[in-house]
Image (cartoon, grey):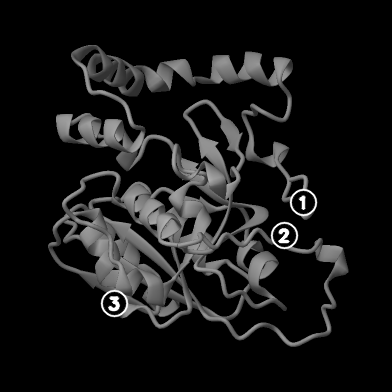
Amino acid sequence: EMRRIMINFVAPINDIDMTQPKASQKITVVTVCYNAVKEIEKTIQSVISQTYDNVEYIIVDGGSTDGTLDIIRKYSSRITRWVSEPDKGIFDAMNKSARMATGEYINFMNAGDLFFDEKVLSDIFAGRSYDEDVLYGSTILHYKGGYKPHRSATIDRMPVCMPFCHQSSFTKVSVLREHPFDTTFLSIADCVFFRQLYNSGGTFRDVKKYIAIYDMYGYVSNTSLKCYFESCLVHRQNPTLGGYLRRLVDINFRPLRYCSLRFMYAERKKPGKYSRTLEAFRQTYDDKA
């Protein structure tokens, strides 16, 4: 079967007729969390500050006991729906949220992660309508010492790597309901989902914008052997003891490797690629972004 790949580019913002009616596409944003009292508030504020006016916000909590629920209740009037109950892991919670969603596209902005700015959803969806299975864009990686951009890749890179960060994507709710995340995977169910969708002829579109600020010390820092084996699977590497030890070193020493001193030095050598402040990065509206 011939693979259908639609590579379309969003027009520059200056070319949009802002007098036309706003697109009717409803967007569901989901935050999955568990005992995230230190991170959850900034994520909630990032979502509810979006200027796009057709957004549904769902929070799926795994039964937190650390004060997370107090913060969720604080913003309950701005949250469409939230639940707190035990689940079988992050991907089980994501599948649950997809069954709750009433939007056309769904985005997972989990605890600790943020939208690039308050206009992300408006920049992508206002005055426009899409039909692709997945929309995706670029990401700002947040380390202890600063920020580093991660540009989205062309979709033909999917067989060998993830062209985008999951937080920087919007997936059709109908597609995710029909093909939910495989919860037998602890850490790579999203990669498996996108790769299978690509192989079956799913359509993808790079919107050429920064979408998310991703916390590099979040869930991907799991040091379990199962996560290591899954990482080898998705990157098509052979698992070895040496490889696992290198993973442990990378995760445990990441705060030191990406400290403020490194960013202070790197931003002088490579301005635009490293910065100690988020203000150094600007949203882009052209195909060269």
Which residue is found at the position 16% from the left and 61% from the top? 63
Above/below status of 99 relative to 206: below
Identify the amino acid type marked 1: Asp
In the figure, residue 149 lies in which quadrant?
A: top right
Disc with the residue nearer the chain's start (3 vs 1): 3
Decide which of 273, 57 is in the foreground and name it: 273
Locate the N terminus and report the quarter of the image it occupies: bottom left
Which residue is found at the position 30% from the left and 67% from the top? 179
Residue 183 is situated, as x and y percent measured from the top left of the image, at: 19, 56
Q: Residue tagged by mark 3? A: 99
Residue 78 is situated, as x and y percent measured from the top left of the image, at: 45, 76
In the figure, residue 232 lies in which quadrant?
A: top left
Can you tell which mark lies on residue 143?
A: none
Q: Circle 2 — which element?
A: loop
User: Distance of mark 2 from mark 3, alpha carbons?
Assistant: 30 Å
Disc with the residue nearer the chain's start (1 vs 2): 2
Decide which of 184, 155 is in the foreground and name it: 155
Q: Residue tagged by mark 2? A: 9
Residue 64 shown left or right of residue 55 in the figure: left
Residue 168 shown left or right of residue 82 in the figure: right
Q: Residues within 10 Å of mark 3 (few under 14, many from 20)?
A: few
Q: Residue tagged by mark 1? A: 287
Which residue is found at the position 20% from the left and 52% from the top? 66
Query: Marks 2 and 1: in contact by CB < 8 Å?
Result: yes
Q: Residues within 10 Å of mark 2 (few under 14, many from 20)?
A: few
Identify the amino acid type marked 2: Phe
